[in-house]
Amino acid sequence: MKFYITTPIYYANDVPHIGHSYTTIASDVIARWKRLNNFDVFFLTGTDEHGAKIAAAAREKNKTPQDLCNEMSAKFKEAWKLLNISYTEFIRTTEQNHLISVKEIVEILFKTGFIFKKKYEGLYCLECEKFYSQKDLDESGSCLLHKTRSIVQSEENYFFRLSSFQFELLKRISNPNHKEYIEIQPEERKNEIIGKLRLGLEDISFSRIAVEWGIPLPFDKKQTVYVWVDALINYITGVGYITDDAKFQKYWPVDVHLMAKDILWFHSVVWPAILMAVKLPLPKKIFSHGFFTLNGNKMSKSLGNVISPRELVDKYGIDAARYLMVTFIPFGPDGDISWRELTSKYNADLANNLGNLISRTIKMVEKYFNFQVSRITVNLQLARKVAVVLRKSFAESMDDMQFHKAAEVLKGVITLINRQIEIDAPWKLFKVDTKKLSSCVSSYLQAICIIAIYLLPFMPTSSERIWNMMGGIGNINETAKKYFADMIIPEDGFSAQQTKSNMMEILFPRIEK
Ligand code: ME8
């Protein structure tokens, strides 16, 4: 089975920050979760490189737009490498393949009469790359998101007949039984979209005459394709539209488009309408998560509070940074983060809860068995209990993209193991009942191996280290995939029940505030 997931393609006007990292890590966690479940995953990310905003940023920095894009897309790639993002492909909208597919789509729309020329005057926010009507702006005429004054643009542009899709979109978005149902999540945002759709749709500008930095319209070289249309088409270019039919047939339609609420309208209304107009299948799911603020403030250059992925990794390490980002606030609603709270969560979940379980288990293996727990007693009882909980509750939360809930389930099973250790009281068995002691310690090793498997999507490197510390047999990734295929714990368990002293590393050292 295939699974195709996308992040937004981020504007190449500046370097990545943790807002971009948030969506990208979440997509990576899903991609890894699906791979674990033996899906053939295509995970697309990239950079949005055309339009007035990029051209303005390049001018400001005294660079050509192309040079700026080369530089910034390299920065995004670097950040995703740092965060261990397992994307299949990184698309750039200035690539040749993309120009070909944009031209094809625009050509079809022109021939079929979905685009037409019209004189237009409107208020434009450069930051959003979007026209607004007066009622969408505040009293000073500024965009609500960026607080920048919208400028009046008067042009003769091509327009897309978005208005003619109102009812077809409403049916597809609101009726789960529709054969082309587009599932929008979370429910509240879907309802907002439905509400707005019911009010009616206006045709949208499809080209710009004053913006040179863009893809020229094939039938009117004086105009360039509106950057949002250009950008949305990346989702089909990325899986081989026009250039690789087999790949396109295999992966399109997309299973999940992931983004924040700021750009949900473009994804759930404009994009499906374009696809319907060119008769291509529609996205299956569109998930829009919330926006987070930092200590109650919007992250912005002017406030000087923008956090880079590097700062996050320097503080917590790669895997912990990944884990914290996606579990700190529920995925969907808006939220607020702060260094203080992130550090508390790091200490509570990783240094204390998970970290302590690992270190107390390793200490038992060392103290009672000199790193070799007898193979005669393989005890899978606890591992089976843990597996039952994870298989159901963890899997459900992950499938719903409720990462914080999945993390709670993990915490629950860690508590379960800790409680079992208290009940067994291995310290009382030492030198009294070696057989029972080895059976108990065996059960902890086997159970923690399962936890390591389920942690893989969040913490790919630490999971492997936990696996090795617990004496996990073979490669964790291969074993995990096999386990997910049949959901049967091998008779001899996952752990060889021996571990080496050099494996006694502290994975998540406590951080003092
Ligand atoms: O909109 N909280 O690009 P963009 C949560 N190029 N998510 C955040 C965030 C925050 N504080 N800040 C940024 C564009 N994001 C277009 C997209 S797609 C065809 C074209 C994330 O660079 C979130 O995913 O402005 C948001 O939707 C995206 O960055 C906007 O990135």
Image (tube, rainbow, N blue to C red):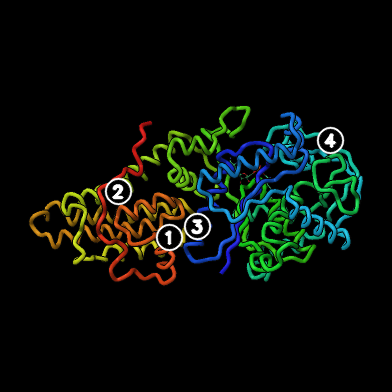
Query: At numbered mark 3, what does the secondary structure look like: helix, strand or loop?
Result: helix
Check residue 32 in the rendering and tell me which mark sits there, or answer none: 3
Residue in the image at 84% along x and 35% along y:
152
Q: In this view, does 128 lie to the left or right of 379?
A: right
Q: Earlier in the sequence, mark 4 or mark 3?
A: 3
Q: Which of marks 2 and 1 is nearer the N terminus?
A: 1
- Mark 2, Cα crowd under 10 Å, few <14 / some 14-19 / many 20+, is some
| Residue with the mark numbered 1 | 477
Gap in Å between the C-alphas at discs 1 and 4?
55 Å
| Residue with the mark numbered 4 | 152
Report x, y in % for residue 329. Answer: 49, 45
Gap in Å between the C-alphas at discs 2 and 1?
19 Å
Residue in the image at 45% along x and 62% along y:
395
Q: Which of marks 2 and 4 is nearer the N terminus?
A: 4
Q: Which of marks 1 and 3 is nearer the N terminus?
A: 3
Among the 4 quarters of the image, the one containing residue 303: top right
Query: Which amino acid is tagged 1?
Result: Asn
Report x, y in % for residue 423. Answer: 19, 56
Residues at badges 4 and 3 in contact (C-beta under 8 Å)?
Answer: no
Residue 438 visible (yes or no): yes
Gap in Å between the C-alphas at discs 2 and 4?
64 Å
| Residue with the mark numbered 2 | 503
Report x, y in % for residue 137. Answer: 74, 37
Q: Is residue 376 left or right of residue 274?
A: left
Query: Which amino acid is tagged 2?
Result: Met
Gap in Å between the C-alphas at discs 1 and 3?
10 Å
Check residue 223 in the rendering and tell me which mark sits there, or answer none: none
Query: At numbered mark 2, what does the secondary structure look like: helix, strand or loop?
Result: helix
Which image quarter is the N terminus in? bottom right
Q: Is residue 207 left or right of residue 442?
A: right
